[in-house]
Amino acid sequence: KEVRYSDPVLVQGTDGVGTKLKLAEALNCWDTIGVDLVAMCANDVLCAGAEPLAFLDYIACGRLDVPTAAMIVKGIAEGCRETRCALLGGETAEMPSMYSPGKYDLAGYCVGVAEHGQLLPRIEQIHEGDLVIGLPSSGVHSNGFSLVNRILEHTATKLQDRAPFSEDGCSSFGDELLTPTRLYVAPLLPMLRQEGEAVRALAHITGGGLTENVPRVLPEELAVELDFSGVSIPPIFGWLAAKGNVSEREMLRTFNCGIGMVVIVTGDGDQAAWRKHLFPHGAVLLGKVVSRGPSEQVIVHNF
């Protein structure tokens, strides 16, 4: 990486992919789970205003199956290429007394760098009238799979069954659910570099959904009011809500519901900057920052 920081700060993030591993194991399909691992870590580092620089992985299992490990690492390498992040290495631990045959656990660690004066979030600079932008998700991503697995079991749905909501009409539930987590470095990093002063905060919508992740970057006295009428919600979420009898409140607290990253930008001036950088990546104007009333910090309409 070329040196372009006058006051650099290192940012680190670590994460895993949770019980999405159970689906990869059930289908013996390991080639995308590595992308999920990179995305979960790199997207979090990005939320601090940092550029991901390096990634390391940890793979734990009972007995290592080399073809399986190769597929996992292939996905990790793909994710690193997409983020222009160096894959420095990792650790593989065989622990037969801890893991039964065929069981795996994954963890990742990402290091990034940011200019000290451009670290995010800038909570003290968020004001009423600031705009809330949403970047679309690719599907369920890597959170909420404990509930997904319960719904699949409750409905006796097999991962190999055709998903009636799939766009091509022939994809299985496994195909839909294993769609890798979207990486947001490519669409957002250029905006942070060129229009950084306009960005107030980024919120990666992971465990806890919109209703728990967005408040983490808001002042206590402010809230966001969101309108989902312009959001293209992947149909997998409608199926999960209907078949699992999941309430709107629980859906918004568990899943990303079609929005994988939230960007809060200043409401001053025109909107040319974020439109130029984010519209080509499917961004939608979700709503705005408002004064907080007695209700929660995330108010959603037309979901």
Image (spheres, grey):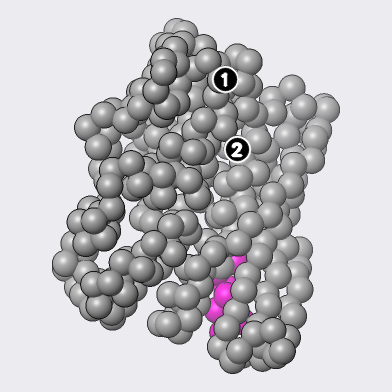
Q: Which mark is residue 180?
A: none
Q: Residue at x 69, y 49 (%)?
A: 13
Q: Quadrant of the C terminus?
A: top left
**Residue holding disc 2:** 47
Q: Residue 184, image x and y in percent?
A: 51, 45
Say whether disc 1 or disc 2 marks the residue closer to the N-terminus: 2
Q: Residue at x 69, y 25 (%)?
A: 118
Q: Residue 140, image x and y in percent?
A: 38, 56
Q: Is residue 104 left or right of residue 60?
A: left
Amino acid at circle 2: Cys
Q: Residue at x 70, y 90 (%)?
A: 96
**Residue holding disc 1:** 219
At mark 2, the secondary structure is loop
Crowding around mark 2 (Cα neighbors within 10 Å: few <14, some 14 to 19, many 20+) is: many
Q: Residue at x 83, y 27 (%)?
A: 7
Magenta stretch? 68-77
Q: Is residue 35 above or below residue 175?
A: above
Q: Nearer the viewer, residue 10 or 96?
A: 96
Q: Quadrant of the N terminus?
A: top right
Q: Assign the magenta stretch its main secondary structure.
A: helix
Q: Is residue 283 left or right of residue 86?
A: left
Distance of label 1 from label 2 (alpha carbons): 17 Å
- Residue 26 in the magenta stretch? The answer is no
Residue 65 seen by the camera = yes
